[in-house]
Image (spheres, helix red, strand yellow):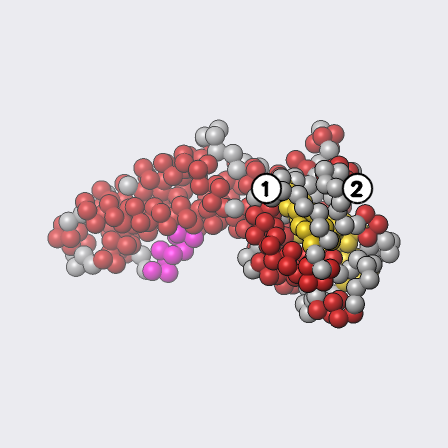
Amino acid sequence: MDERPPQDVGFTVLVLADPGQCVDRARAAQGRFEEELAAVFGAATVHVRTQFLGISDSNTLALAPVDAVRGDYEHVDMTLLLTEMPRRADKRALIAELLPDREVATLSLPTIGVLSGRERLVTVFMACVMQRGDALTEQDRARYSLRWSRWSETSDRHGAHLRSSAVIGSIRTVLGMVATNAPWRAAPKLSSALAAASATGAFGIFYNSIWQMSAALSTPRLLLIGLLAMTSMVLWLIVGNRLWERPMRDDATTVLLYSNLSTVLTLFLCVLSLYVALVVLILGGSLVVIDPDFMSGVLGELATFARYVDIAWLSAALGVVAGGLGASFDDSTDLRQLTHGSRESLRRPSRDAQG
């Protein structure tokens, strides 16, 4: 709920936002949004409320719960629905959709740009409000027109779409979905993987055969080994947790492509963080345990800091592979709620989930 006392003054907007980054971004923009509305309408009030937005049988946002929430407020001129779901129209990513008959606009935060600033979100909010049929001056409409996108009528002419560019919009949407997945949420769920990876990686400190192998490998080859190790763990986590989404209807292919790409990138960031942490831990341990003179005797060359780094890098690669195996045997490692596809299934009617 909006934490501020309700005060329906002037033009009133209700923002219903998905939990997580959507509602956080909406609250951060609330004051600035009110200022911009007041500049146009004289006075304005913005309410921000957390609402997990569902999907109807027709694969659109369910508006019945929205109508019920609006009833909690004395007066609402317009409702904005801010969701983390990616949406498309005419083969392009959809930034916003206006439903003038319902006085509702739906906005996709990933396509707007999760990494963009507060001003961009306020600008899109205002662009939606400016599409209403109120007596607004052309100067007001021009002030909040978007240079990077234009409104177009929907196919049924009962609304309007604000679409992103074909290439940049798709890239921004996938990156936005990665951000809303919050990769850092996976870290506590990979505790078993980290334990297995640390135990295996520690062998690199005590076995001089790994020292010799790391010294014999070139830097590009070491980097390739690390990349292959991380890729194998990502694939293992996707298969083991059944995170790869398959289309359940004909029009979902591209959206699921976004979802699957964001899943891969999210997990890769998680595994990369795990890998870097292992390298740092093993490097610290090796500097304490391995005497430089002893290493020099084993390798037949001067034990430089770079050699310690090589040992840590190769040992971490072995540890990451073992970590993926360890996570597959731990029932507590459930990453399904990390992905958009799994969270979207929660939005659908229960009979959908039953098949």
Magenta: main secondary structure equals helix
Tell me the element at label 2: loop
Question: Looking at the image, is 198 positioned above or below residue 41?
Answer: above
Residue highlighted by disc 1? 3
- Asked where in the image residue 338 lies, by quadrant, the reply is top right
Callout 1 crowding tier (Cα within 10 Å): few <14, some 14–19, many ≥20 = few
Q: Which mark is residue 247?
A: none
CA gap, disc 1 and disc 2: 34 Å
Kind of residue sitting beneath label 2: Ser
Q: Quadrant for the C terminus, please.
A: top right
Residue 112 in percent (x, y) is at 63, 57
Q: Which quadrant of the view contains residue 92?
A: bottom right
Q: Viewed as shown, does residue 282 lie left or right of 338? A: left
What mark, if any, has residue 58 been given in the picture?
2
Residue drawn at 33 percent across, 49 percent down? 279
Q: Decide if residue 316 is in sight here.
A: no
Pinpoint residue 172: horizontal percent, then vertical percent. Answer: 60, 58
Q: What element carries label 1?
A: loop
Local crowd at mark 2 within 10 Å, few (<14), some, or many (≥20)?
Answer: few
Q: Are marks 1 and 2 in contact (CB under 8 Å)?
A: no
Q: Compare residues 229 and 256 and report the one nearer the observer.
A: 256
Q: Give the range drawn in magenta.
A: 219-227
The residue positioned 60% from the left and 46% from the top of the image is: 23
Q: Is residue 223 magenta?
A: yes
Tag 1: residue type? Glu
